Image (cartoon, rainbow, N blue to C red):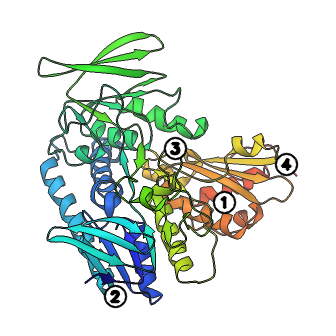
Amino acid sequence: MPIKTEVLVIGAGPGGYVAALKLGKLGKKTLLVEKDRLGGVCLNCGCIPSKGLIYTAGLLHKLRKAKAQGFEAPDLRLNWSKVQDWKNAMVSGLNRGIAMLAKGNRVEVLSGSARLTGPRRAEVATASGTEVVEFEAAILASGSHPISIPGFDFDGGSVISSTEALDLREAPGRLLVIGGGIIGLELGTIFAKLGTQVTVVEFLPQLLGGVEPDLAAPVARNLQRLGVETMTGARARGFTPSDGGLQVSVQTPAGDKVVATDKILLSVGRAPNHKGLGLETLGIAADSKGHVLVNGSYQTSVPTVYAIGDLIGPPYLAHKASREGVLAALAVAGRPAQARGAIPSAVFTDPELAVVGETETEARSRGAELLVGRFPFAALGRAQAMRETDGFVKIVADKNTRKILGAGIVGPDASDLIGELCLALKVGATIEDLAQTVHPHPTLSEAIGEAAEACAGQALHILTPARA
């Protein structure tokens, strides 16, 4: 007999499982299908394990450079294999947490690969056979996967993706990172702090392409301090085994180079998991890259089928998928629509970097008159006390309405601090709203209020020309 449910959710990553939980809370009978582990890439081999390793490597690095604060630990060592065991245990605990939440919200979980066979019907290949599912609506949340480039196919040994990099039991002596974007630089920073000789090859003229140069610059400078060699405007052409390692041919603006390494981390982008879902069977519309096309309610060209997250296009971010999961669930349940809101982005390099809303470049390109304020962490007592003074807060506001259009933070705890600016955008706050908000002292958040004041030339702890 077919399994009958009101809503079928395919994919239990941060978009799919959140959609399922929301549907459960809205009283919808929901079946959540996942072919691997609950939590998807983000929990199992992405966001969460990487942040655990970033924190651990960062703690080691901070202790080693804290001599000026009186720390003396010449024999400080880190057992990376034990770190991996801790990381894996943490992930397993969070897996169990999602299963518990699903059960508590009356969401049924089925392990297997789902494929749509009709507008209200699917087949799920499980370990014990094929199950037929009949549904009233379906939400596709299948996520994405890392892509390769010619000459660098993933083999799990010489050429690895972020998945394998996060499971290495020991740090390689040398690591070549192809791709100077978010994932490549986050992982490169981890291994640089563990003592690995890291080289980054980036095709674009700037690391962190798409990030404004002033915000990306402190990250690039600190990579140099960590001993990371970066090659921008460069292309990796191929590699050959040599002397127990690998020889990688790189084309750079200064000429061809050969880089010796032990492993190659390929991090050049991701693509949606659109194959095997049955999209072609139903005629669900997609773009040339496989991203499913949806309307404002996340409905596909087949009205009973919805899609969210990486499957519908960038940015490939867990919190974007989660928000879309909630909105799709509301639409399926016939509840009033909500705006998605501005999607922030956070980069867990050293220093951290986070942005939300319009950039200065984007706003100026459409002819907006702007007020732009910056406040450096070096002028902040808390940052000095933490010995984390790199970077600044930047706020972009409309000159006429004084409303905040966007913001960027590069510096300590940027990923946490950006939340205040996300809220400011959500409620349509002005620079005066932020400037007149009392921030506790001494904290890093004071930089936000000062940056708002700097938009009007009124910051008190830096010298700026006064403005009206």
Front position in the image: 46 or 146: 146
Residue 161 sits above or below residue 304 on the image:
above
* Residue position marked by numbered label 3 in the rendering: 288
Front position in the image: 292 or 454: 292
Circles 1 and 4 in contact, beta carbons < 8 Å:
no
- Real-space Cα separation, disc 2 to disc 1, in angstroms: 44 Å
Residue 270 sits above or below residue 45 on the image:
above
Of labels 1 and 4, earlier in sequence is 1
Residue 409 locus on image (x, y percent): 57, 50
Q: Amino acid at mark 3?
A: Ser
Which of the labelled discs sits on residue 467, or is there none? 4
Residue 467 locus on image (x, y percent): 85, 48
Helix, strand or loop at mark 1 = helix
Q: Is residue 458 visible?
A: no
Q: How many marks?
A: 4
Circles 1 and 3 in contact, beta carbons < 8 Å:
no
Q: Amino acid at mark 1?
A: Gly
- Real-space Cα separation, disc 2 to disc 3, in angstroms: 38 Å
Helix, strand or loop at mark 2 = loop
Helix, strand or loop at mark 4 = loop
Circles 2 and 4 in contact, beta carbons < 8 Å:
no
Of labels 2 and 3, earlier in sequence is 2
Q: Which of the two discs, 3 and 4, sits closer to the camera?
A: 3
* Residue position marked by numbered label 1 in the rendering: 449
- Real-space Cα separation, disc 2 to disc 4, in angstroms: 57 Å
Q: Which of the two discs, 2 and 4, sits closer to the camera?
A: 2
Relative placement, left or right, of 76 versus 257 is left
Front position in the image: 24 or 414: 24
* Residue position marked by numbered label 2 in the rendering: 106
